[in-house]
Amino acid sequence: MNKIGVHFGYFNRNWNTDFVKQIDVIKRIGLDIMEVAPAPLLALTKIQRDEIAAAAKANNIELTFSVGLGLDQDLASEDETIRKNGIKFTTDAFKVMSEMGAKMYSGVDIAAWNKTFTEGIIDKSAAWERSILAVKEIMKSAEDMGITFAVEVVNRYESSLVNTAEEAIKYVDEVDSPNCKILLDTYHMNIEEDSFAGAIRSVGSRLGHFHVGECNRKPPNEQGKMPWDEITGALKEINYQRIMKAYHSL
């Protein structure tokens, strides 16, 4: 049975929130997972992070990490200093994850979030190769710490590097690590994929994480437009047993 979770940002717009209080809320509504952003946790002391981890453990809530890399952390940047900064940020996040007992790291984690190529650029091979090399280096730490690094497939308006399941398959196959997986998100799939089921089936065992949300980023609901029977049917076909997370914004 899949564990179901929610991003902590769903309940508030302040990312420097009271994580312990959020854990209590998530427990009371019957969910299994709280997805958190690494940056606010990196800013806390180890004692504070230990308190959050203890609260999660006491409430049987699993913690997962989700990131949107900044421009100064872009793993596909032409600037080596920026790429190194992104590598350090990621591996520092892995260390915090290990402290807190978390094993899933996902999101826009291979390039900067909300950075798209300028008009007219159609060859992304150079940025692709820079990102691949950086992630290969990162995967050494992920493998040592037993962390799954899931590459999120996002729409063309938020990133230019990996926009479809087909591209994600090519990317993770080139990284060539057992800990490098794919994150599919129904919101982004609704924009980019020709077929929900086709994309899910093509990814198959590479699927490490799955985000569910309507085309307006609200949680799945009876008034929504997503073909949930098709989506869940394809997940069953590939025997997907990992995490499912509801979206994080209203």
Image (cartoon, rainbow, N blue to C red):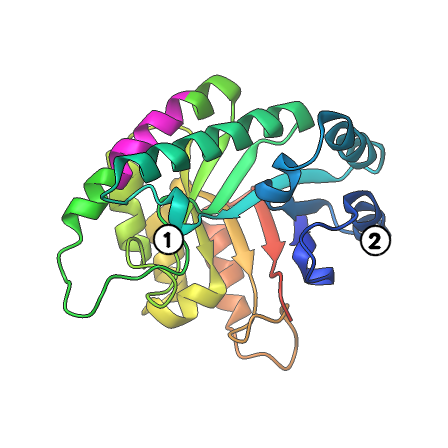
Give percent across and percent down for residue 140: 38, 21
**Residue at the extreme top:** 144
Please tell me the numbered disc located at residue 201: 1
Q: Residue furthest bottom?
A: 223
Q: Nearer the viewer, residue 195 or 213?
A: 213
In the rendered image, the quadrant that contains the N terminus is: top right
- Whether residue 3 is visible, yes or no, is no
| Secondary structure under the numbered disc 2 in the rendered image | helix
Query: Residue 126, percent across and down?
Result: 16, 45
Q: Is residue 68 visible?
A: yes
Compared to 109, does 141 lie above or below?
above
How crowded pointer 2 is (Cα within 10 Å; few <14, some 14-19, many 20+) is rated as some
Q: Residue sitting at 54 percent across and 68 percent down? A: 228
Q: Is residue 37 magenta?
A: no
**What residue is shown at x 26% (from left), y 35% (from top)?**
80
If the image is split into quadrants, where does the C terminus sit? bottom right
N-terminal of the pair, mark 1 or mark 2, is 2
Task: Write the residue at 79% across / 46% down.
Answer: 23
- Magenta region, residue range: 131-140
Task: Give how far apart the Cα atoms at labels 1 and 2 are.
Answer: 34 Å
- Image mark count: 2
CA neighbours of label 1 inside 10 A, class few (<14), some (14 to 19), many (20+): some
Q: Is residue 18 left or right of residue 142?
A: right
Give me the residue at 59% from left, 51% from top. Answer: 244
Above or below: residue 43 compared with residue 155: above
Q: Is residue 68 left or right of residue 19?
A: left
- Per the image, the residue denoted by label 2 is 25
Query: 241 or 224, which lies in front?
Result: 224
Q: Nearer the viewer, mark 1 or mark 2?
A: 2
10, above or below 33, in the image: below
Where is residue 146? Give x, y as percent: 52, 23
